[in-house]
Amino acid sequence: MAGLCEGGNEPPSSLKSISGQSGQLGSGQLGLMHHEFIPEGRTVTKELYVETLRRLWDAVRRKRPEKWVENNWFLMHDNAPAHRAIIVKNFLARHNITALDHPPYSPDLSPPDYFLFPRLKSHLKGRRFNAEEVIANATRALRRVSQNGFQACFQELYTRWQKCVVAEGNYFEGNAVE
């Protein structure tokens, strides 16, 4: 997973997500900005990831020009091998993209894991589709997420980050931060 965060010096309030499993998704507080699906049987390599970042970078330029001009966004990665590759780090440096570290094994800090995938599953659950139908139905489900839904997701991320800081990075469940 990776995410593009809009914002300043505080933990971001907006996130653009990319998933390497079945597709690559881009969203911000204003809703879905970019999406593409990875062909069946294809693996997310460092080269594919750089190409995805290039398209994501272009989407920011076209759809959020104020963020582009001010360079007021951050990329949030998980620790997938493709995300840590030198070719990716070089791309980020060359394009002056700030990457925020993501703690390993932290699906609770990954908006696709706690927000987006459950919504997609609820729309697709219990039905059988061929690959083209999955893509069409997933795209419709993504586009149905309202601006308020995305904003709530990013506020939840901020709250989750705060809990993680209070817990000093230690594991906790639910709201039980000691």
Image (tube, grey):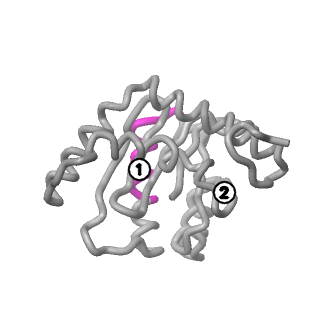
Q: Quadrant of residue 149?
A: top left
Measured in 3D between alpha carbons, the distance from the residue under mark 2 to the one under mark 1, in whole angstroms, is 23 Å
Q: Nearer the viewer, mark 2 or mark 1?
A: 2
Residue shown at the point (58%, 38%) measured from the top left: 6
In this rendering, the answer to whether 62 lies above or below 85 is: above
Which quadrant would the C terminus be assigned to in this image? Answer: top right
Q: Position of residue 51 (x, y in %)?
A: 40, 65
The residue type indicated by label 1 comes to Asp
Residue shown at the point (53%, 56%) measured from the top left: 2
- In the shown orientation, is residue 81 left or right of residue 54? right
- Local packing at callout 2 (Cα closer than 10 Å; few below 14, some 14-19, many 20+) is some
Magenta residues span 53-66
In this rendering, the answer to whether 111 lies above or below 147 is: below
The residue type indicated by label 2 comes to His
Residue pointed to by mark 1: 58
- In the shown orientation, is residue 176 left or right of residue 54? right
Q: Position of residue 3 (x, y in %)?
A: 53, 50
Residue pointed to by mark 2: 102
* Residue 115 disc label: none
Q: Specify whether residue 141 is painted magenta.
A: no
Q: Count the marks: how many?
A: 2
Residue shown at the point (34%, 46%) measured from the top left: 121
Residue shown at the point (64%, 62%) measured from the top left: 105
In this rendering, the answer to whether 28 lies above or below 94 is: above
User: Foreground: 63 or 22?
Assistant: 22
> What secondary structure is found at the residue carrying circle 1?
helix
> What secondary structure is found at the residue carrying circle 2?
loop
Q: Position of residue 5 (x, y in %)?
A: 58, 43
Q: Mostly what secondary structure, the magenta segment?
A: helix
User: Foreground: 69 or 86?
Assistant: 86
**N-terminal of the two: label 2 or label 1?**
1
